Each structure stands twice: as C-alpha cells, then as structure tokens.
Amino acid sequence: MKILGLSQKNSGCGYHRVVLPLAYMEGITGYVTNLPSDEVIDSYSYLLYNRVSVLDKNLQVLKDKGYKIILDLDDDWILPPSHILYENYLTIAPQIETNIKAADLVTVTNQRIYNRVRTLTDKVEILPNALPYGINQFTDIRHESDKVRIFWCGSITHDKDIALLKMPFKRLNAHKNVQMVIGGFNHSNDLSKYLWERMWKDFTDHGKLDNLILPSCDPTDYMKLYEHADIVVIPLEKSGWHAAKSNLKILEAAAKKLPVIVSAVEPYILDEDAPVLWVRNQSDWFKHLNNLINNKSQRDYYGQKIFEWAKTKYNYFDINARRKELFKGL
C-alpha cells in the first residue's frame, strides 16, 4: 500500500492519528505532508487525514483515479455553544459531514463518535488511541527534583476543567515540598494570554504555590513536558461532548510511569479497570494528592501499574496492525 497522509505540522490530532500510524505501519510506503503536489498525489493510492484537508474539494476526483479515502475523527464535530471553538466548527461541520459520506472508511477513537458517524455512513470502525511505549519520546525518562511535582498540560480549551481544581488546590499550601507544573502555555493572542493566566491562577492559587510554567511545543516532542512530573492530574467536566473524547491523557501519563488522579467521568471512567485514583467528589482531589505527596512508594506503585495496564490494553502495534488490515480490505 502507498498511503498519503495529510496533516499540519502543529496538529496533535494529525500527529497521533496520521503521522504515528504511518510511521509504525510495516510493509507500506507512507508520506505525510500538509500540501501535496500533483506529482505526489499521482504517486499514492490511499489518502489518510483527520477531519478536513486541502483536498476536500477533490475527493471524488481522487476516487475516480482509484484512491481509497480514509477519514479519521478523534473528536465530535458538534461542539457545545460554550466551547471556545464553537463558531469555528459551525463553519466546518458541514464539510466534515460531507467528508464522512465520501470516505471509503472512517476511523474513530470511541463508541460515542462511532454512533454519531453511523447516522451518516456504515463504513466506520473504532481504532482507539494508543502510544508506542519505549520508543522515541514515549520513554519513561524524567528529570529529578527535590519537590513533588503536580502536573497538567493542555490548551486553553480546558479552561473550565482547570477551574475544577481551584478550591482543592488552595489546600496544597499546607505542603511545602510541592511544585505545580502547568504545560502548554501559549500567549499567541490576547484571548490565549487571558485564559492561560486565569488557568495558571486556578492551578497555583494565584501563584502562592511554587510553580513552573512550560511553553507549548511541537507534537513531535510534547512528551518532554511530562519529564517535569511526579503526579498527573486530569480534571474534566462532565458533558456529552467531553464524553466523546479519548483517554489519551491517561496513556501519556502511563508512558512516563506516572500516577494519575482523574475525574470519574466519560471518557475516562469507561476504563474503570484502569489503576488510577478516581475523583468522584471534589474532596477527592486533595485526598488523593495528599496521599501521593506523602508516599513515594504509592507514586511508584500506581505509576508502574498504569504503565503495565496501558501497554497491555492499548498495545500500539496490535491496534496499528488492525488499522493496516482495515486499509488493505478497502
């Protein structure tokens, strides 16, 4: 198979759902670009992309040439009005639905997206997110620190999720050996700067807690942010839209063998067998943090357990082998 992948350089979705799958798919010829030339297009026979692409208006032309079109969706394309990207997606949602109908195969990360796509096409399969543990940036290398580092990274779209930590984290001032590490900072515009500063205040009790700010980086080396962590917190609001997201943050923590404290809501709670510390009440944030801060052995235990669990249940090479077979069957 000769597979052309389309992705933007800074797209995390493209990295996980296009770049990595082709990089670790054996026995194929793969090439990823954001803007393919006619010569490149003529050299391939499969197209893999996420949501929308520069070739959206030419899909039928490609199919007439014998191309097999594979569309990937790792998120719901119908956003709640409160979402920062709501207006943007109002304009691209119709194109995404057109692409779904045109595709020879749609791959999705979970059952909720599968169910929504199924109303538009029956050519859909679930391929959960996974990571190639032990390879390149997905190793368990971390920097040492004399502080216990409480870590989160992401984007401004998680503003309301971080707000869940505001009151529980105030109680961490009783601990003098902790450092709050927040990663992904990007002050590219006034709105981004405003939201990041608000998130930083919620995460650090207005800077009263010792803290470290890590700037955003390319998807190809974003796991270096996790090298400054001892405990990973994953807050998430309960909503239908959030429930359609994947469990990737748990899988990322597992790569570094880091213990995880996570909101007991979908999608995470769907993995109820995961060896994580579930937050079912707001008081659980401090309860679990207090335990892990004071017990290195517990941090090590949960870190090792989550790594073993993720590597077995979400084995990258097994999932990618199934992806290859689905592509070959088109």
Image (cartoon, grey):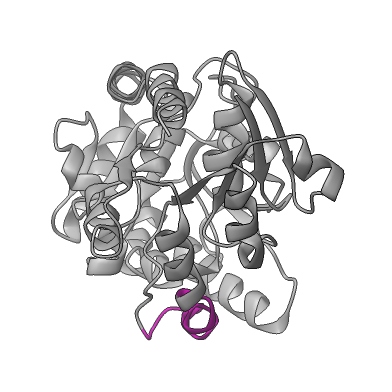
Give yes or no for residue 238 being in the magenta stretch. no
Q: Is residue 282 left or right of residue 68?
A: left
User: Camera-side residue: 319 or 246?
Assistant: 319
Query: Could you tell me residue 318's position as x and y percent?
Result: 38, 18
Query: Could you tell me residue 115's position as x and y percent?
Result: 21, 57
Give yes or no for residue 92 being in the magenta stretch. yes
Q: Magenta stretch?
A: 81-93
Residue displayed at 17% across by 44% down: 270
User: Camera-side residue: 45 or 117?
Assistant: 45
Residue displayed at 83% across by 49% down: 38
Query: Could you tell me residue 259's position as x and y percent?
Result: 35, 31
Q: Looking at the picture, does residue 111 appear above or below residue 46?
A: below
- Magenta stretch mostly in which secondary structure? helix
User: Camera-side residue: 256 or 326?
Assistant: 326
Asked if residue 256 shows in the view, the reply is no
Which part of the image, by quadrant, shows the N terminus? top right
User: Camera-side residue: 205 or 251?
Assistant: 251
Which part of the image, by quadrant, shows the C terminus? top left
Q: Is residue 42 left or right of residue 240?
A: right
Query: Could you tell me residue 236's position as x and y percent?
Result: 31, 60
Q: Quadrant of residue 272?
A: top left
Asked if residue 47 shows in the view, the reply is yes
Q: Looking at the picture, does residue 30 appear above or below residue 71?
A: above
Q: Looking at the picture, does residue 127 appear above or below residue 52?
A: above
Q: Is residue 202 left or right of residue 119?
A: right
Q: Quadrant of residue 45?
A: top right
Residue extending farthest front? 64
How many marks the image carries: the answer is: 0
